[in-house]
């Protein structure tokens, strides 16, 4: 093959060379935006780096890690984060499934329904939080107005000022915001189920309810799992909605891990400790998403 | 599943879905037509007593809303294109090439989405500063591309995998190089997937707030979400004006998805997120 | 037209799993060669190595005397028809066929002429504006073939092109491909798992099993002189009856029933530890001809096919199938006498699978 | 005419600042200034900068704005300064920030440019000696002031013949009387800010300070008197119970108080200085001409005190033009500049003398009432970790007002958390 010129060889790179070439842009970007910053973060977590003191960096080994384990705020935020995840992920799934089933009915006009599913998804998180905080306002909120019009309760409920209610309001907002996209994915899944399966089930004498559990749910399972996993990752990172709705209040009843990290790093300027918290959060995400990656692994 | 087909029930179902999706947007629209005084009257009004467009006028005069709109558009479009190119190349390598550790490579790319950007804010800021990129489109385009890389890669990998390998082989036998086959056959065929991934990326970039706030704070480079927070001041929270600005911010995306909804839903159906 | 040579061609993955074991083949100018074998035998892999779609781990592939091992597919001057047609769904039929010519910068009028000729030949000239999705399976297959024809390549490669068609269409297309070959006189390498297809189409057949070449010869030779147990068992419908036997006094002992063998054959079998006795169903007859040997048997199952009836019979401990006239009506359980010409008897070494002739 | 005079005075001051400088003017210096958000009136600052540029041809000033609220600005500046960004030379910062930023080494000490702290701060309101001098160094120069005022409905007090209340109890009694008399269920007695925003820090401090107690000593060490703090919070809660303050006070933010007062739903309202114009000038105000300002009430036996706010000019430690920047800062902190901001933008002056300036009194008559309040003003706790201090105080206060925490526990929490930070 002496005849093959250099150009010819460049047009037909070996499999590996081509792979490196194609993957290079992605990995360069990841190195710049993720790997290097994470490195900085892990490095910082071993230092007492409080920018407010102006006292510079002091190596403290694992001290920050020990402090985190004793930190009641950390455990509170972790608990809140986990709770939000445990409530809103199944919540969004159930709501999304409901919306998807409704949207899958034979409508003459499809677009208003589709648009209704797409709009909440396209609304920025921070704005969704702002808008829903307004909805839940004790005096000017539409929620209490509806309650009043329906004739319940003489005293308006202070939704965002009671830890339980505030938590519920935040979860509801997250479910509203995220169930639409869930519904879109599930709707796509629903439309792929062949009609013949339902016809077969009808011939076999299955009721609608049985058809739902025996056909719809099993056939949707791949979509459901992918949607759940994506949702779980973002749920663990919950920040914008509680930040705009309650600022983590009342007290720190609705503070999530991401908020605590943001507060520690940006407000308190305690970069060392904030970095350590971030490392913990990463470990938590990693633990949860290992399951996810295994799943992808099985499918790819 | 076959649900009741009766017309009234179907309409009720449609009503539930539509109200759920539209209510907040409609509420914002109504609020944008009210005066600030009406907003704090009790009991609250649903329909504006004195509808006014003054809030829109103010939304455009208080802040350079058009400029923010343009910035958001530029950043979102540029990062969408870059995400698609970078993700398409990587996804092709993962889906098609006979590479070792393909799984590990995909895992690395997806794992990058697990790290909350909030926590990386300060290091990213430092990086951008040392590269002299603060207050440029690039400062946002690069992180947004990374933000979108996992989902775009996943969508495109499954799309590429769904395209018969023999199509590419046929193209190579017909006379294409490997990259030629990618460009002439695979990419056009993955168009629905590319489109779905593109919409996902665009919306993500359009929504992002925290990085935009920190990396591009200068007045001429602000994006829409950052700009909208500026209507509120230390002492003021002009809901009607903010609502007006929100309406302006929501409309382009709503139009975009209304026009392309068929393809968004279709793209998802064709295996996009189906793993 | 061109000739293709394979010299010790080997394919292995990661240097461990070997799927093609040193195959030598020579395909002459204008010859129609079929690779046949059960799925997983490596026939498609071998074809794709010739196409350049799979790397070659060892040996060499030569087209017209030129080693093409490292040549990308586009530079090998071949055309290929794929099992799933692999039509470009985003291009109409005309563009599908023209694509390869455009890439080679063929002038537009030449493209038009060649595409139109091919389309007329394949009777798809009235639907060139359509996209593949609007076509039936048979039509798609024609387009795929047309795409190969317009290129006027040195070698045509067919990878199970008919396996996605229904039975009737398959027969039609088979005939058309055969006619096409006669008309174009092209060198064709054709892969199929269907031995009938192989028999009807091929000038020469290469039978492959587990990555090994079992036999490479004309259909006639393959059928009548199978070189290996595998070839015998793979060809013919139903295939050759193959039965364990022992050699006793110049006859094959099928467990109580003895079939006398020609002396030459018996001599070859002598001393082999395990033997297989083989006879094709059509060579087991109910009416004796001069020189035939009789074999007592008992009817156990009838399968009328209209033109003939397949009869399963017990011969000693073994079961064999015979091809009988449609008039055969003996009920199961009745005893009959089969007749077989000694020249049609085969004997194989059960351990190596080699034919003893 | 008044305006022309003012401009002349400014030009003079700007010229003097230039003359004082030793740098030759032929080198063009570009100064980049972070000038806060819209509420910090970058439009007016631009006019002052134009003045300065006119008098100092070698200097070109560019403005950057961002961050609508003090909190957002602090977050943004923390990120920028954290990265030692040299792009910005001068920062406008909230009164609570000099200690923190100086502590972090982000601000250039200005002693070399303005002289020793005691003398430099002498002409200004007393609060600045406390807030702008850190470790014996001048960290920032006052730009304009702000303070929490007690606004009230003059018409209603007159109607029920009630004098300005001097103590919180008197205020509660007056409110109840008016609320009962008006019979309007939506009428609130007193509006304060209980949402976990910066204003809630003042909400915590006002009743506490008015018992004559201090939050911290001169060195910044925490001196919280737990009993007094609990008493202060209980004072608010008692008013909530008696219906003087509305039940969802923990939701109330600064603009809510303003809007409700404007809508005539509030008798007494505590708010920043900007609110005056909202009440008296805004078209949709229903209380024009019915608004009074008075010093904040005290606890029985205590002394009136208020929370001072406002913005300062500081030079970045990472600036490459420190000398030029310091000169501009000095100019922005002159009496003439302060007067300009008072007359043109009703921004509270940082010099006691400017409050009584005839031009200022003419332009903004209510400033003469304001001066008494401002002089009694105190600064919020000064700490290198103000971000943390503020966060702890406002979230706890808000939680107590939402009744999710008992005052006793809340104060205990503040004490234990801040004892570590403020020592």
Image (spheres, coloured by chain):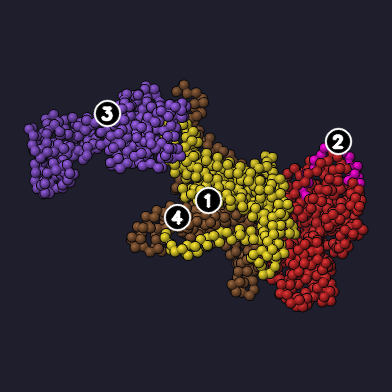
- Residue at x 15% of width, y 47% of height: C302
Residue B142, percent across and down?
62, 42
**Residue of label 2:** D26
Secondary structure beneath label 4: helix
- Choose between B104 and B223: the one closer to the eye: B223
Q: Which chain is represented by purple in the image?
A: C
**Residue of label 3:** C203
Task: Residue D22: say if magenta.
Answer: yes
**Residue of label 4:** A190
**Residue of label 1:** B261
The color chain B is rendered in: yellow
- Residue at x 42% of width, y 29% of height: C112
Work out how far the residue at label 2 is from the one at label 3, CA to CA, in angstroms: 96 Å
Work out how far the residue at label 4 is from the one at label 3, CA to CA, in angstroms: 52 Å
A98 to the left or right of D176: left
Work out how far the residue at label 2 is from the one at label 1, CA to CA, in angstroms: 61 Å
Region of the chain picked out in magenta, as a range: D12-35
């Amino acid at each position: 093959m002496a005849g093959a010129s250099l150009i010819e060889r460049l047009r037909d790179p070996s499999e590996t060379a081509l792979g490196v070439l194609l993957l290079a842009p992605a990995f360069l970007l990841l190195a710049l935006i993720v790997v290097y910053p994470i490195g900085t973060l892990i490095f910082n977590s071993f230092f007492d780096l409080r920018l407010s003191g102006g006292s510079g960096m002091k190596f403290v080994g694992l001290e920050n890690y020990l402090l985190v384990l004793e930190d009641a705020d950390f455990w509170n935020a972790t608990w809140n984060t986990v709770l939000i995840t445990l409530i809103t992920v199944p919540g969004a799934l159930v709501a999304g499934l409901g919306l998807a089933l409704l949207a899958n009915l034979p409508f003459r006009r499809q677009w208003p329904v589709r648009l209704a599913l797409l709009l909440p998804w396209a609304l920025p998180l921070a704005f969704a939080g702002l808008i829903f905080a307004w909805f839940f306002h004790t005096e000017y909120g539409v929620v209490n107005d509806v309650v009043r019009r329906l004739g319940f309760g003489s005293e308006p409920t202070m939704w965002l000022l009671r830890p339980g209610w505030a938590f519920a309001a935040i979860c509801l907002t997250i479910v509203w915001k995220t169930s639409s996209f869930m519904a879109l994915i599930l709707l796509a899944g629903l439309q792929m189920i062949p009609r013949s399966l339902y016809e077969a089930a009808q011939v076999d004498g299955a009721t609608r309810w049985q058809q739902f559990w025996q056909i719809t749910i099993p056939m949707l399972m791949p979509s459901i799992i992918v949607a759940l996993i994506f949702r779980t990752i973002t749920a663990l990172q919950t920040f914008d909605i509680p930040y705009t709705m309650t600022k983590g209040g009342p007290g720190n009843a609705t503070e999530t891990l991401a908020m605590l990290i943001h507060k520690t790093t940006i407000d308190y300027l305690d970069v060392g400790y904030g970095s350590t918290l971030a490392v913990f959060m990463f470990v938590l995400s990693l633990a949860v998403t290992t399951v996810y990656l295994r799943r992808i692994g099985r499918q790819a | 599943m076959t649900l009741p087909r009766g017309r009234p029930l179907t309409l009720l179902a449609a009503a539930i879905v539509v109200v759920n999706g539209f209510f907040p947007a409609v509420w914002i629209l109504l609020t944008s037509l009210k005066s600030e005084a009406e907003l704090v009257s009790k009991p609250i009004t649903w329909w504006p007593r004195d509808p006014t467009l003054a809030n829109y006028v103010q939304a455009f005069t208080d802040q350079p809303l058009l400029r923010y709109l343009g910035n958001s558009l530029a950043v979102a479009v540029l990062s969408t294109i870059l995400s698609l190119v970078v993700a398409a190349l990587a996804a092709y390598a993962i889906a098609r090439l006979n590479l070792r550790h393909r799984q590990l490579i995909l895992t690395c790319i997806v794992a990058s989405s697990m790290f909350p950007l909030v926590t990386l804010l300060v290091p990213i800021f430092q990086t951008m500063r040392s590269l002299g990129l603060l207050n440029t489109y690039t400062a946002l385009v690069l992180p947004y591309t990374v933000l979108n890389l996992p989902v775009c890669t996943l969508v495109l990998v499954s799309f590429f995998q769904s395209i018969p390998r023999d199509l590419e082989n046929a193209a190579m036998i017909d006379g294409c190089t490997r990259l030629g086959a990618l460009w002439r056959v695979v990419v056009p065929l993955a168009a629905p997937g590319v489109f779905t991934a593109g919409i996902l990326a665009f919306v993500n970039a359009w929504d992002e707030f925290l990085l935009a706030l920190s990396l591009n704070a200068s007045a001429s480079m602000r994006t829409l979400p950052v700009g909208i927070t500026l209507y509120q001041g230390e002492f003021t929270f002009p809901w009607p004006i903010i609502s007006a600005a929100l309406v302006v911010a929501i409309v382009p995306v709503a139009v975009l998805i209304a026009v392309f909804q068929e393809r968004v839903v279709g793209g998802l159906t064709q295996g996009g997120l189906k793993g | 037209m061109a000739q293709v040579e394979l010299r010790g061609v080997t394919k292995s993955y990661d240097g461990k799993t070997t799927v093609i074991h040193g195959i030598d083949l020579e395909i002459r100018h204008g010859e129609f060669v079929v690779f046949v074998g059960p799925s997983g035998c490596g026939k498609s892999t071998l074809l794709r190595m010739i196409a350049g779609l799979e790397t070659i781990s060892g040996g060499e592939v030569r087209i017209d005397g030129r080693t093409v091992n490292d040549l990308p597919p586009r530079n090998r001057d071949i055309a290929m028809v794929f099992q799933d047609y692999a039509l470009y769904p985003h291009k109409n039929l005309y563009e599908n066929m023209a694509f390869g010519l455009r890439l080679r910068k063929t002038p537009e009028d030449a493209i038009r002429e060649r595409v139109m000729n091919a389309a007329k030949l394949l009777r798809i000239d009235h639907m060139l504006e359509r996209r593949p999705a609007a076509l039936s399976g048979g039509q798609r297959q024609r387009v795929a073939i047309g795409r190969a024809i317009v290129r006027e390549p040195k070698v045509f490669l067919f990878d199970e092109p008919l396996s996605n068609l229904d039975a009737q269409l398959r027969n039609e297309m088979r005939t058309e491909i055969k006619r096409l070959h006669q008309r174009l006189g092209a060198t064709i390498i054709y892969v199929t798992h269907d031995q009938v297809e192989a028999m009807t189409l091929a000038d020469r057949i290469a039978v492959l099993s587990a990555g090994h070449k079992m036999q490479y010869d004309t259909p006639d030779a393959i059928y009548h002189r199978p070189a290996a147990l595998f070839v015998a068992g793979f060809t013919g419908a139903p295939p050759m009856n193959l039965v364990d036997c022992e050699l006793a006094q110049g006859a094959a002992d099928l467990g109580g029933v003895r079939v006398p063998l020609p002396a030459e054959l018996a001599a070859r079998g002598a001393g082999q530890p395990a033997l297989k006795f083989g006879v094709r169903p059509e060579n087991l007859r109910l009416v004796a001809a001069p020189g035939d040997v009789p074999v007592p048997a008992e009817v156990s199952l009838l399968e009328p096919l209209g033109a003939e009836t397949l009869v399963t019979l017990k011969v000693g401990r073994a079961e064999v199938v015979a091809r009988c006239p449609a008039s055969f009506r003996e009920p199961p359980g009745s005893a009959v006498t089969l007749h077989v010409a000694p020249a049609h008897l085969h004997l194989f070494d059960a351990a190596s699978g080699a034919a003893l002739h | 005419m008044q305006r022309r005079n003012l401009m002349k005075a400014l030009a003079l001051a700007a010229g003097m600042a230039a003359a004082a400088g030793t740098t030759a003017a032929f080198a063009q210096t570009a100064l980049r200034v972070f000038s806060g958000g819209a509420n910090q009136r970058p439009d007016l600052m631009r006019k002052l900068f134009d003045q300065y540029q006119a008098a100092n041809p070698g200097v070109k000033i560019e403005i950057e704005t961002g961050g609508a609220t003090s909190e957002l600005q602090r977050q943004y500046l923390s990120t920028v300064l954290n990265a030692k960004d040299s792009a910005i030379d001068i920062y406008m910062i909230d009164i609570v920030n000099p200690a923190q930023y100086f502590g972090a080494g982000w601000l250039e000490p200005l002693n070399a440019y303005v002289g020793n702290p005691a003398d430099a701060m002498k002409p200004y309101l007393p609060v600045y000696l406390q807030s702008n001098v850190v470790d014996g160094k001048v960290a920032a120069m006052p730009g304009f002031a702000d303070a929490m005022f007690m606004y009230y409905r003059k018409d209603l007090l007159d109607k029920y013949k009630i004098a300005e209340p001097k103590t919180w109890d008197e205020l509660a009694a007056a409110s109840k009387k008016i609320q009962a008399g008006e019979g309007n269920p939506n009428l609130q007695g007193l509006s304060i800010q209980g949402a976990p925003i910066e204003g809630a820090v003042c909400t915590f401090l006002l009743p506490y300070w008015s018992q004559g107690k201090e939050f911290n000593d001169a060195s910044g060490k925490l001196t919280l008197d737990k009993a007094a703090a609990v008493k202060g919070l209980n004072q608010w809660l008692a008013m909530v119970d008696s219906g003087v303050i509305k039940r969802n006070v923990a939701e109330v933010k600064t603009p809510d108080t303003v809007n409700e007062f404007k809508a005539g739903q509030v008798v007494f309202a505590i708010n920043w200085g900007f609110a005056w114009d909202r009440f008296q000038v805004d078209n949709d105000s229903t209380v024009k001409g019915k608004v009074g300002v008075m010093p904040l009430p005290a606890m029985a036996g205590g002394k009136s005190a208020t929370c001072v706010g406002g913005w300062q000019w500081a030079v970045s430690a990472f600036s490459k033009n420190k000398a030029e920047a310091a000169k501009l800062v000095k100019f922005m902190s002159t009496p003439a500049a302060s007067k300009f901001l008072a007359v043109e933008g009703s921004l509270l002056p940082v010099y006691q003398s400017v409050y009584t300036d005839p031009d200022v009194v003419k332009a903004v008559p209510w400033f003469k009432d304001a001066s008494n309040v401002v002089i009694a003003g105190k600064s919020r706790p000064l700490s290198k970790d103000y971000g943390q201090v503020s966060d702890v105080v406002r979230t706890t206060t808000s939680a107590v007002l939402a009744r999710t925490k008992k005052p006793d526990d809340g104060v205990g929490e503040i004490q234990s958390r801040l004892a570590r930070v403020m020592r």
